[in-house]
Amino acid sequence: MNALKLKPVVTCSVCCSASLRAGVPEIVWVRSNVRRFQGKTFPVWRCQDCGSIHAAREIDLDACYQDYPLAASSRPGWKLRLLYRNQLRRLRAAGLRRDMRLLDYGCGSGSFVAYLRKRGYRGAVGYDPFHPELSSHTILWPAFDMVLAQDVIEHGVNVVGSMRDLTRLLVPGGVLIIGTPDAAAIDLAAPEPFVHALHQPFHRKILSLRALLVLGYRNGLALERLYRTMYVNTRIPFLNERFMAHYVRCSDDTLDAAFDPVQPSNRRLWTWRSVFLALFGSFFSRHTDVTAVFRRPVGPIAPGQPRS
């Protein structure tokens, strides 16, 4: 593990802490899990107060997202549709109805929105600042009954502002659902098993679960439900977090490998470990991702004000 010292005083933009209890933090260099940046490493550091992880080097975000592997087709295959079904199940549990207005914030190509609308959720719309056809701010008005931010806030440099903006998109009583990695579940002393959660250089600020809940509280939100695993971790054979990680590791261990055609000639896939993880991998999640379901109160409440 390569290490480099930061400046003597470092301020965490999440919790605004400038006093790091263990002194000057170390920068840990983490390899990218995207083929375009294969062989390159990027520096990250952890705030010792709130536990959030920060990317330590500025990048050109617009250039970075060219040919992004998750910018999938708007016509998902059967595997992605099954994962979307699991995500929809969570939205329904949070109160989603077909007459509601839902915003998928950071929707990529809009494939999940298309999936929802095909199933009768006509009030579903998508916004993504990096998609030329979905980046208009007119999409963000009027307010929404439900806002989904799946794998979004960790991509921004200002998570505090993002949380505030997402809250403002809700009608009173509306629901905000945030799916994001949990920095507290990532071991920077041994980062290799966590390169997909770290997802460098795209993840700029990874919140700890504690920091996420505090930000929700400061915006007057009430936590209604917490999932300690991501929606892609299902009990459907082959569609779980651990098997997917094993599958890409049998190739070049990049995110791109998940979207490549299946290669039956790859002998690393034909093992008992592959079979075991395909069938039972959902029970062995590393819990590196969480989904928090927040609700905005019906009555007015000042940000940071405790509820009675």
Image (cartoon, rainbow, N blue to C red):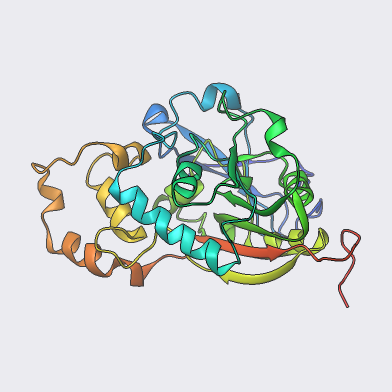
Residue 58, placed above or below residue 7: above
Residue 243, placed above or below residue 127: below
Q: How many labels sit on residues?
A: 0
Q: Position of residue 24 (x, y in %)?
A: 71, 49
Q: Position of residue 273 (x, y in %)?
A: 18, 63
Res 141 seen here: yes
Image quadrant for the C terminus? bottom right
Q: Residue furthest bottom?
A: 308
Which residue is at the front of the view, 156 or 52?
156
- In the visual, does 275 lie left or right of 47? left
Location of residue 94 (image quadrant): bottom right
Q: Position of residue 181 (x, y in %)?
A: 54, 55
- In the visual, does 276 lie left or right of 222? left
Which residue is at the front of the view, 114 or 158?
114
Residue 126, placed above or below residue 298: above
Res 185 seen here: no
Residue 251, placed above or below residue 63: below
Which residue is at the front of the view, 46 or 272?
272
Q: Residue at x 26, y 70 (%)?
A: 280
Q: Residue at x 90, y 66 (%)?
A: 305
Q: Position of residue 193 (x, y in %)?
A: 39, 54
- In the visual, does 138 lie left or right of 75? right
